Amino acid sequence: MELNCPTCHNLLELNNGVAHCVTCDKDIPVEARCPECHKPLDVLKACGAVDYFCQNGHGLISKKRVEFVPLSA
């Protein structure tokens, strides 16, 4: 899933729950959501690995399937 900067519309770089715009030099917080129910996911971090878990019956969600949504300011 690609995210674009709300200001300049260039592609954002996603890193540890924050999207960064190189052009604007701005960080935008994002929320991980389930691709099935679109509700926020629990983020599980251990030994450098990050996993995503849906408490609404969809279990572990692959990072490739997670929907990252920019949070409103």
Image (cartoon, rainbow, N blue to C red):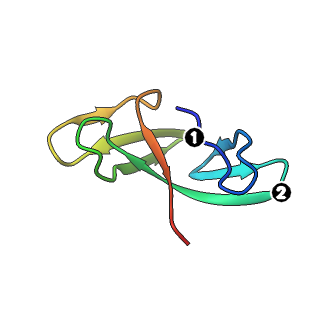
Task: Kindly identify the residue that appears in the image at 65 percent across and 55 percent down.
Answer: 6
Q: Is residue 37 above or below residue 20?
A: above
**Residue 69 in the image: x percent, y percent?**
48, 50
Would you name the residue on which mark 1 appears?
48
Residue at x 17% of width, y 47% of height:
56
Neighbour class for label 2 at 10 Å: few (<14), some, many (≥20)?
few
Three-letter residue code for mark 1: Gly
Left or right of 47? Residue 67 is left
Q: Which residue is mark 2?
A: 25
Q: Farthest residue toward the bottom?
A: 73
Q: Which mark is residue 26?
A: none
Give the amino acid type for the residue marked by disc 2 in the picture.
Asp
User: At x 25% / y 35%, what residue is drawn?
Assistant: 36
| Mark before the other along the chain sequence, 1 or 2 | 2
Q: CA distance from mark 1 to mark 2?
A: 26 Å
Q: In the displayed structure, does residue 28 sit left or right of residue 60?
A: right
Say what secondary structure mark 1 lies in: loop
